[in-house]
Image: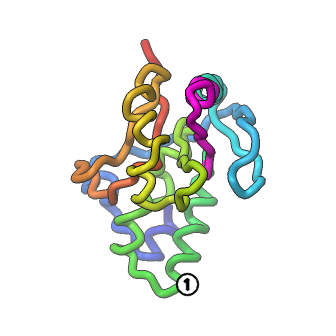
Amino acid sequence: MREAIALGVPRDYGRRRGLRLVREPIRLASIGADIHGREQWLAPRAAQAWLRMQAAARDQGVSLQPVSGFRSARYQLDILVRKRERGLGIDEILAVSAAPGYSEHHSGRALDLTTPGFAALEQEFERSPAYAWLRRHARRFGFALSYPRGNRHGIAYEPWHWCWHARR
């Protein structure tokens, strides 16, 4: 976290945003390739739920494609560094990306999704049949939209970001 603070992440970031530090899973399971051909990983139970949800959507003619799954806090820091090198300010970055250590992607339970015909990681995804399908069915598989409009964490609306929550 020292490196993130050196890049301008406030020391009280988690408290201010209502976010907790996220522990990385000990084990990960492959969920196959993302839209760029890179292998993606999730925590084992989240991976099982994702694969069931993806198959159910496919059976109904909806294509759900992963853009990003697990990423480490170190990788999240690298994203922050690259954005700073491109001249983005820390507030601008933290409006769309969680600080290293606080991203749901670290948990191995979060996925960024897209579908053919829609740009990845863009709000236009909310107009897709895939998004409509997720809104109707994702909860059945344990997935929820993490960052709706006006969310309490101050993170930009991300219709593509879904996180699996274990059912008790």
Left or right position of 42 against 15: right
Q: Provide the residue span drawn in magenta.
A: 53-68
Q: How many marks?
A: 1
Q: Is residue 60 magenta?
A: yes
Q: Which residue type carries mark 1?
A: Glu
Please provide percent x and percent y for residue 42.
Answer: 64, 36
Residue 47: name its quadrant: top right
By what rule are the colours in the image chosen?
rainbow
The image shows residue 87, relative to residue 65, as above or below, that is below
- The residue depicted at 50 percent of the width and 59 percent of the height is 121
- The residue depicted at 52 percent of the width and 41 percent of the height is 110
Please provide percent x and percent y for residue 63.
Answer: 60, 39
The image shows residue 120, relative to residue 78, as above or below, that is above
- The residue depicted at 33 percent of the width and 73 percent of the height is 91
Q: Is residue 105 magenta?
A: no
Q: Is residue 45 visible?
A: no
Residue reaching furthest front? 61
- Judge the density around disc 1: few (<14), some (14-19), many (≥20) Cα neighbours within 10 Å: few
Left or right position of 155 against 152: right
Residue reaching furthest bottom? 87
72 or 164, nearer to the observer: 164
What residue is disc 1 on? 85
Residue 106: name its quadrant: top right
Q: Is residue 87 visible?
A: yes
